Amino acid sequence: MSEKLRGNILVTGANRGIGLELVRQLAQSIGENAHIYACCREIEGPRAQALKNLSTPGKITLVKLDLSDEGSISSAVQAVSRNMEAGGLNLLINNAAINRPESPAPLSATGKQHMMDVYETNVVGPFLLVKMLLPLLQKAAEMDSEGDQMSCSRSAIVNISTLISSIEKCPESFHIAQMYPYRTSKAALNMLTRCHAEEFKRHNILVTAVHPGWVRTEMGGEKAPLTPEDSVAGMLSVMLSLSNKHSGMLLDWQGNTIPW
Ligand SMILES: NC(=O)c1ccc[n+]([C@@H]2O[C@H](COP(=O)([O-])OP(=O)(O)OC[C@H]3O[C@@H](n4cnc5c(N)ncnc54)[C@H](OP(=O)(O)O)[C@@H]3O)[C@@H](O)[C@H]2O)c1
């Protein structure tokens, strides 16, 4: 990346997979006045070790955040607000998510609790997080004197969605990955993206959903063709290119539009 994202950036699900790689590449590329808030469920112990091993002194603050727990979301937002002092939040990347039951997750193996758990983490969590972080996102947008220009450096929410959230494209992938809870939760996250884009455009806050590709992580599995490095490099480059016309859209990691 030759250009750089700036300001305060918050990433959820930062301890492994795509979230960890987002933090690693951001920490390498951001300037001195930028800072990353890397959120994960456990900030002590082995699950946070890979994040702690990133050698980036002063650039990353670890924040404890469980998206299925409203109290945890509230505590995380308070901690971030205190840490930012006078500044605002420039970029929120809603990356954390779960997929239950294990893929391919056919109807016969899927129950009420799977539907509830996945919706809670993938939709309700980001909904509450955005609601509580809105004053900080507004502050960042107001501190910038760029008129009505939106960007990920000014004030933005990027929701990590998926190709298989697309209702139009469902027939192409349904038989290999049924995943009722996951698909429906990400379709709901897309609607949240669209609603937030409508509501927040008066504040000049950009809101876009991005599909990372099929990526080799715990969720993506070993057969996935893309490495986290390539997926994240692509998504960061897309984030740098986002402007008003992309708010309320679903794009892939290469910047192509995905139909709803
Ligand atoms: N991999 C793919 O092929 C692919 C394709 C399309 C979209 N995506 C999307 O890309 C994003 C990242 O996926 P990934 O492949 O990196 O998944 P992953 O390897 O399974 O990592 C998921 C991350 O989310 C965190 N998380 C889970 N539940 C949480 C909760 N209640 N509160 C806070 N954090 C929680 C996990 O933390 P713990 O370690 O504590 O569990 C972990 O950091 C997700 O939104 C996913 O839907 C992935």
Image (cartoon, helix red, strand yellow):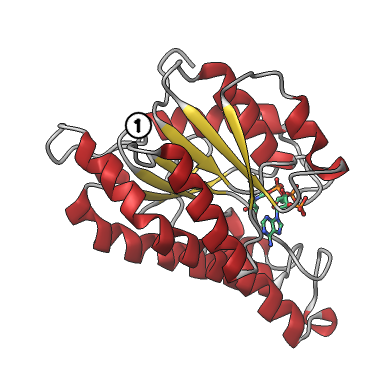
Q: Residue at x 31, y 57 (%)?
A: 197
Q: Residue at x 53, y 33 (%)?
A: 36
Q: Residue at x 60, y 48 (%)?
A: 12
Give residue 159's position: percent from left, percent from top.
Answer: 49, 52
User: Number of numbered discs present?
Assistant: 1
Q: Residue furthest left?
A: 147
Give residue 43's position: percent from left, percent from top.
Answer: 74, 45
Q: Is residue 208 left or right of residue 140?
A: right
Q: Secondary structure at mark 1?
A: loop
Residue 139 seen: yes
43 vs 112, nearest the viewer: 43
Q: Residue at x 72, y 24 (%)?
A: 54
Name above or below for residue 65 compared with residue 235: below
Q: Residue furthest top?
A: 2
Name above or below for residue 39 compared with residue 59: below
- Residue 196 quadrant: bottom left
Amino acid, disc 1:
Ser
Task: Report the residue marked by disc 1.
Answer: 153
- Residue 47 quadrant: top right
Q: Is residue 9 left or right of residue 171?
A: left
Q: Is residue 187 left or right of residue 55?
A: left
Residue 206 seen: no
Crowd class of label 1 (few under 14; some 14 to 19; many from 20; radius 10 Å) = many
Give residue 251's position: percent from left, percent from top.
Answer: 45, 46
Give residue 255's position: percent from left, percent from top.
Answer: 45, 37
162 vs 88, nearest the viewer: 88
